[in-house]
Amino acid sequence: KAGVTQTPRYLIKTRGQQVTLSCSPISGHRSVSWYQQTPGQGLQFLFEYFSETQRNKGNFPGRFSGRQFSNSRSEMNVSTLELGDSALYLCASSSKTGNYGYTFGSGTRLTVV
Amino acid sequence: AQSVTQLGSHVSVSEGALVLLRCNYSSSVPPYLFWYVQYPNQGLQLLLKYTTGATLVKGINGFEAEFKKSETSFHLTKPSAHMSDAAEYFCAVTLMDSNYQLIWGAGTKLIIKP
């Protein structure tokens, strides 16, 4: 079956702009999590959605938001981009709860200039 | 608070040698434990996981890990390194009382010398 699909793969934006990233989970997976990965901070949890409801939230400012649709697809939005938002954004899906392990997408590489 | 410590940000081994990547966690309750691998410019791939049952867990690509509760460790091993094993490896734990949120180690970059 198809894996987790993230679009776009690469993105270049200017400071102050906003960006929306998309994640399509594995068919049947209802949980979608988002992570930010940077060389300095490593993997940092952004939020998790399950059945269209935000279940967990990491320690990020309100500029970072997300949502999940009824078909489990998820989007992440970052407003008023800052240089420090440059990172690899990873999406992961799981069937029910995280103890079964997450399947990750290849990520979206966001560069803010 | 729960945490995960991976000893060594970089580990270098010769091709054919034993691979040992260390992971220790702090938790007051038994966790679920995972090892993920990340190749350059790619997402993370699940190598293996421990939830319950046998403490020695076998994963993909010849890797295995052993859960040692007394040592709060979940070290990753492979008997013989291959050039294709060069990647970054992440240990993670999740707890039922954290709503299964994953807590990640900082990662260990495995370098294979020819």
Image (cartoon, coloured by chain):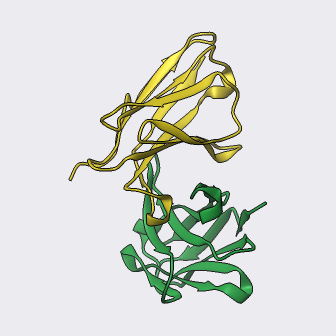
Q: Is residue B18 above or below residue A26?
A: below
Give the colour of chain B. Answer: green
Q: Is residue A103 above or below residue B29?
A: above
Residue B110 rendering spot, x and y as whole percentages: 56, 66
The answer to whether any part of residue A38 appears in the image is yes
- Picture quadrant of residue A16: top right
- Picture quadrant of residue B85: bottom left
- Picture quadrant of residue B99: bottom right
Nearer to me, B89 or A90: A90
Give the colour of chain A. Answer: yellow
Residue B15 rendering spot, x and y as whole percentages: 48, 77
Is A47 left, or right, of A68 in this rendering?
Answer: right
Of the 4 image quadrants, the one containing the C terminus of chain A is top right
What count of labels does the image hold?
Answer: 0
The answer to whether any part of residue B94 appears in the image is no
Nearer to me, B85 or B21: B21
Is A111 left, or right, of A105 in this rendering?
Answer: right
**Which residue occupies 67% across, 57% down?**
B106
Furthest-left residue in view? A1
Q: Is residue B24 above or below residue A49?
A: below
**Which residue occupies 44% across, 49% down?**
B43
Residue B12 rendering spot, x and y as whole percentages: 61, 71
**Which residue occupies 65% across, 62% down?**
B97
Residue B63 rendering spot, x and y as whole percentages: 45, 78
